[in-house]
Image (cartoon, rainbow, N blue to C red):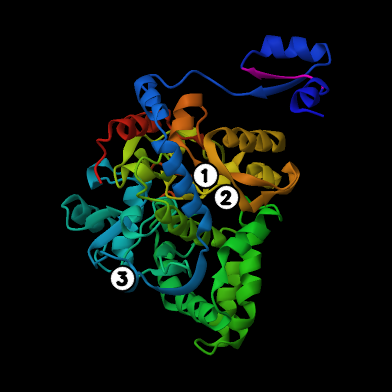
Amino acid sequence: MSGLERLLDTEPVVVTAGVEVLAGALESQSVEVRRTEWSPPAAGTEAALAKLAAGPEAAEANEVAIARLLEVRPHLVDVVRAIDVIPGLTERTFLHAGPPLSWAEASGPMRGALMGAMLYEGLADTPEDAAAQLAAGDIELSPCHHHQSAGPMAGVISSSMPVLVVQDPDTGRVAYSTLNEGLGKVLRYGAYAPEVIERLRWMERVLGPVVGDAIRRSGPVDLRSLIAQALQMGDDGHNRNRAGTSLLLRTIGAALVESDIAPVADRSAVYSFIDSNDHFMLNLVMAAGKLIVDAASGVEHSSLVTTMARNGTEFGIRLSGTGDRWFTAPAPTVDGLFLGSFTAEDANPDIGDSAITETIGLGGFAMAASPAIVGFVGGTATGAVQRTLAMYEITMAEHPSYQIPILEFRGTPTGIDAILVTRTGVRPQINTGVAGKEPGVGMVGAGLVEAPLECFVQAVNALAEGTASR
C-alpha cells in the first residue's frame, strides 16, 4: 500500500489551535480532534525569525548542541569544600542564583541568604552587621552559573560550604552544587536564625565529610541512571525527588556503614538526615544539569537554551549561540499552594537556579511522570500530563534515557529551542518552591510558573543580529 493509500485508509484527525467552538463541533460528529496550543509569533521577532529561517545555520548548529547535551554522563564523584574547587571563589566572594545582581537589587530572600552566609562564615556578628557590610560592597556577588555551579532558591555558595562534585568521565568536565538543607526555615529560602546557621555548620563538619567518604568508597554514582530510574518511580527531578533520594541512599548505604571517618553516631545522623530529606537528590540533579548545559554551550548560531535562572528580582536565560550574555525580564510570581497561614501576599517572585532541571528535560517538563507532584505544587494529575505534552512543542529532542511510563515510555521533552518558544508562544513550564518576600522568613509554599516570553524575544533578536557578546 502506498503512502497516499495509507493516508486515505486512515480515519481523519483534525488538529485545532485555540478554536474551541470548531473542536467541539467536530467532536460532536465523532471526528478525532487533537488540541494544540498556538499563537502568532511573539511581537518584535518577525524579522529575526525570518532571518533565522532563511539559512541552515541555526538548524545545523542545533543538531550539534542537542547532541552534546544528550551525550553527557554525569557522575557524582566527591564532596569537598567549595573554596578548594570552585573557580574564582574566595573567602569574600558569595555566589548566588540567577543572573547578576547587586545588594541594592536583591530581593528579601536573597538578602536573607546572603546575611546568613555572612553569619555562617564568621564575617559578621549580627544580621544588621552582615547587611551593612553587604550594602557597603565588602562582599563580591557573582552568579553560580559563572563558576560551573548551580544553587537552589537563593543559591548562595560561600567558601566553607561542602559542595557536590559531578563529573563527566568522557570529558573530565565538572560542575558543583551545595548539599540540600531540607525544607522550611533554611538558608536557601532566606532564613538565617541560629538553628539555620548551626545546621550549616553541622553540614560542613559532619555531613559533607561523611558523604564524601562514602562516595569515594562506593565509587562514582551514575546520576543519569539514578534519575532515569527515579522518573519511572514517580519523581520529576525538581520538586519530587523521593525516589531519587532513596536510590542514592541505597547506593552509598553500605559505604556509610563501613566508613571509619566519623563515629557511629555521626554516620547514623547523616543517614537519618538524608533519609528524612526527600529533596536531597535535587542538588545532585542540579549539578548534573549544570554539567550537561555547559557541554552544549558555545555552539555558534544555536538557539538551544542553556540557562534558565532566577535571582528573585529577574528571570534570565542564555543561549548556546549567544555565549555568556543574559537576557532578562522581571521575575514572575508563582501560582502555588501555601504553607500554614501564608498567602500569596507573603510570597517573593520566582527565585533559584533549579530551573536547570527543566532546561535538561526534567521538572515541569517531566510532570507527566510524577502525578503525585500536584500535591506539592498544585494543579491536577491530568494537567501535569498536559503540561508535559505542551513542552514537546518547544524542544529539540526526546531524552533517550529519561522516559515517561504514562506516555508509553516516550522520552521527556528536552532541549528548549528559543526560536520555537517565540514562534509558538508556548512558554517553558517550571515547578518551584516559593520563598517568603521578607528576609528571614524561609519557605512559604510551592507552585507553578511560566518563563517570561520577553527573555526569549530578546535572545532570538540577538541571535539573529549576531550582536551577542562572546
Q: Residue at x 24, y 47 (%)?
A: 103
Kind of residue at disc 3? Ile
Kind of residue at disc 2? Asn
Q: Residue at x 31, y 55 (%)?
A: 146
Please report the bounds of the magenta region as a residue range. 11-17
Residue 421 visible to the viewer = yes
Q: Which mark is residue 432?
A: 1
In the picture of the structure, the residue carrying the numbered disc 3 is 83
The answer to which of marks 2 and 3 sits earlier in the sequence is: 3
Assess whether mark 1 and mark 2 are in contact (beta carbons under 8 angstroms).
yes
Q: Using the image, determine if residue 206 lies above or below residue 76.
A: below
Report x, y in % for residue 85.
34, 71
Mark 2 to mark 3 CA distance (whole Å): 28 Å
Q: Which quadrant would the N terminus be assigned to in this image?
A: top right
The answer to which of marks 2 and 1 sits earlier in the sequence is: 2
State whether the magenta stretch is mostly helix, strand or loop: strand
